[in-house]
């Protein structure tokens, strides 16, 4: 997570994205975002994950493999419903892609 935070912080500087902009987009405070991007994390948090994902999307890189593997909620959800079969994988991918359509409709 520390490496992702460092990359996110560097991307913010390169893109000219302020901590306040990130905070407003995520419903957080600027000071929380500052602590995260400054590497002053006490522990892995949901907000830290959200900040990294937000900046990764802005940077045009989309969601990285590290982001997916490093998200215990996502990994746990997939593990709890996927039986390991190809047909189940296809069904799950359809559901996930459908969620993107819902997000765009907001």
Image: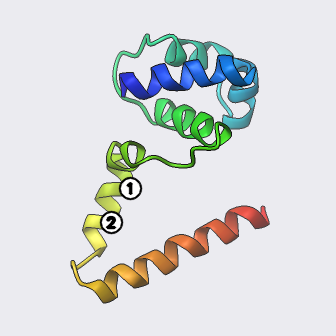
Q: Quadrant of the N terminus?
A: top left
Q: Which mark is residue 78?
A: 2
Check the image and name the residue furthest to the bottom: 87
Q: Which residue is pictured at 46% across the width and 23% down the height? A: 5
Q: Position of residue 46 (x, y in %)?
A: 46, 36
Picture quarter containing residue 60? top right
Where 65 falls versus 40 (above or below)?
Answer: below
Residue at x 59%, y 69% (from the top left corner) = 99
Q: Of 43 and 84, which appears nearest the observer?
A: 84
The vertical placement of 52 against 64, above or below, is above
The quarter of the displayed image where residue 18 is located: top right
Residue 71 placement (x, y as % from top left): 37, 46
What crowding class fits label 1: few (fewer than 14 Cα within 10 Å), some (14-19), or many (20 or more)? Answer: few
What's the mark number on residue 53? none
68 sits to left or right of 54: left
Q: Quadrant of the C terminus?
A: bottom right
Residue 45, position as x, y percentages in the image: 41, 31
Q: Is residue 22 above or below residue 104?
A: above
- Mark 2 crowdedness (10 Å alpha carbons): few <14, some 14-19, many ≥20: some
Mark 2 element type? helix
The residue lying furthest to the left in this view is 84
- Distance in Å between CA atoms under marks 1 and 2: 6 Å
Colour basis: rainbow
Depth check, front residue: 44 or 55: 55
* Residue with the mark numbered 1: 74
């Amino acid at each position: 997570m520390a490496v992702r935070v460092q990359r996110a912080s560097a991307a913010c500087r390169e893109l000219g994205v302020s901590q306040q902009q990130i905070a407003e987009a995520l419903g957080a405070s600027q000071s929380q975002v500052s602590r995260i991007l400054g590497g002053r994390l006490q522990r892995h948090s949901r907000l830290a994950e959200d900040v990294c994902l937000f900046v990764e999307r802005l940077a045009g890189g989309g969601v990285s493999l590290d982001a997916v593997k490093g998200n215990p909620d996502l990994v746990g959800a997939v593990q709890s419903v996927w039986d390991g079969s190809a047909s189940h994988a296809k069904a799950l991918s359809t559901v996930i892609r459908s969620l993107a359509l819902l997000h765009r409709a907001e």
